[in-house]
Amino acid sequence: MQTAARIAFIGLGQMGLPMATNLLKAGYEVAGFDLSADALQKLVDEGGQAAKSAADAMAGSDVVITMLSNGKVVRNVLTEGEAYRQAPKGALLLEMSSSAPEETRSLAQAVSGHLRVVDAPVSGGVKRAVDGTLAVMAGGADADFSAARPVLEAMSARIFHCGPVGAGHAMKAINNYVSGAGVIAAVEAVLLGNAFGLDEAKVVEVLNASSGKNNATEVKMNQFILSGTFGSGFALGLMAKDIRTAANLSVSLGLSQQGLTQTADLWDDAARTLGGAVDHTRFYDYLKRQVG
């Protein structure tokens, strides 16, 4: 694939816009679509093109990237009126949203014969989306993944081919389960230490120098929770959705995983209590209420 390839980027939110910007910096032609006029204008300011619709963005594009809220939205955008057929036959679809693997496989079947599908969800948050250092978990046929790799490299420092279509979204759900469980452990540890009379910052400092260190203690507790900023850029509802996706996958495979089920239940209850739109680091507020 040549660097001059045209890319349709559908979904220019907190993650999508900086990802599209990095594609522009890498020399790709990017036609973007989003319901937000402000997001479209920002893309234009960076040198991209504002499309009038998803179908308009896909017309003549060698690669279609979707970065939307979930798999159902992705399917609606692509298949309503068979919009995906506006892309040339054989174009690559990089489904980079946080979707359920079963939905991704169903979508791949729906567009087969016209689009080649690689699911490629990301991890790393807004900062790494801006820096172009996201981790990508990809699923798809070997040849399709190889064709997608140059595009992914413009947005990512670490790219993992996890298996066939759907494998990337399965891995993303599994990753966010582990991440969400780590948040629970870190917050409960801080609250426990505080109840005993330990300084919260000292608890985090010791954890980060010891075997209790995890992603939450390293990059969330001081930066977003204890500081009171709660601005990681990832919504609580999205975390809850991804963990529930992992729990549903577990059930569909006939597994009984109580830790996963309990983690999903806690995050779902937090989203109901606080609202899904708040930053996921607000989970601290939820658990603090539970402690009493």
Image: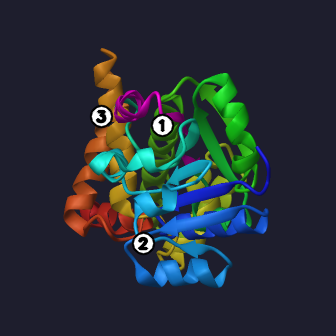
Q: Report whether residue 191 is seen.
A: no
Q: Do the residues labelled 1 and 3 touch (CB within 8 Å)?
A: no
| Disc on res. 21 | none
Task: Measure the C-alpha gap from mark 1 to mark 3.
Answer: 18 Å
Viewer-nearest of discs 1 and 3: 1
Pointer 2 or 3: first along the chain: 2
Question: Which is more toward the observer, 106 or 58?
Answer: 58
Which residues lie in the magenta part? 103-122
- 141 is within the stretch colored magenta: no
Residue at (22, 54) in percent of width and height: 269
Residue found at the very far top of the displayed protein: 254
Task: Measure the C-alpha gap from mark 1 to mark 2.
Answer: 29 Å
Q: Which residue, given by chain and number where applicable, does mark 3 sit on?
A: 261
Q: Are marks 1 and 2 in contact (CB under 8 Å)?
A: no
Residue at (60, 48) in percent of width and height: 63
Q: What residue type is labelled 1?
A: His
Pointer 1 or 3: first along the chain: 1
Q: What residue type is labelled 2?
A: Lys
Q: Which residue, given by chain and number where applicable, does mark 1 sit on?
A: 169
Viewer-nearest of discs 2 and 3: 2
In the rendering, at what x and y percent does residue 154 appear? Answer: 75, 55
Question: Which is more toward the observer, 88 or 267?
Answer: 88
Q: In which quarter of the image is residue 44?
A: bottom right
Residue at (53, 67) in percent of width and height: 32
Q: What residue type is labelled 3?
A: Thr
Q: Which residue, given by chain and number where applicable, does mark 2 sit on?
A: 52
Q: What element carries label 2?
A: loop
- 119 is within the stretch colored magenta: yes
Q: Is mark 1 on a helix, strand or loop?
A: helix
In the rendering, at what x and y percent does residue 165 appear? Answer: 51, 28
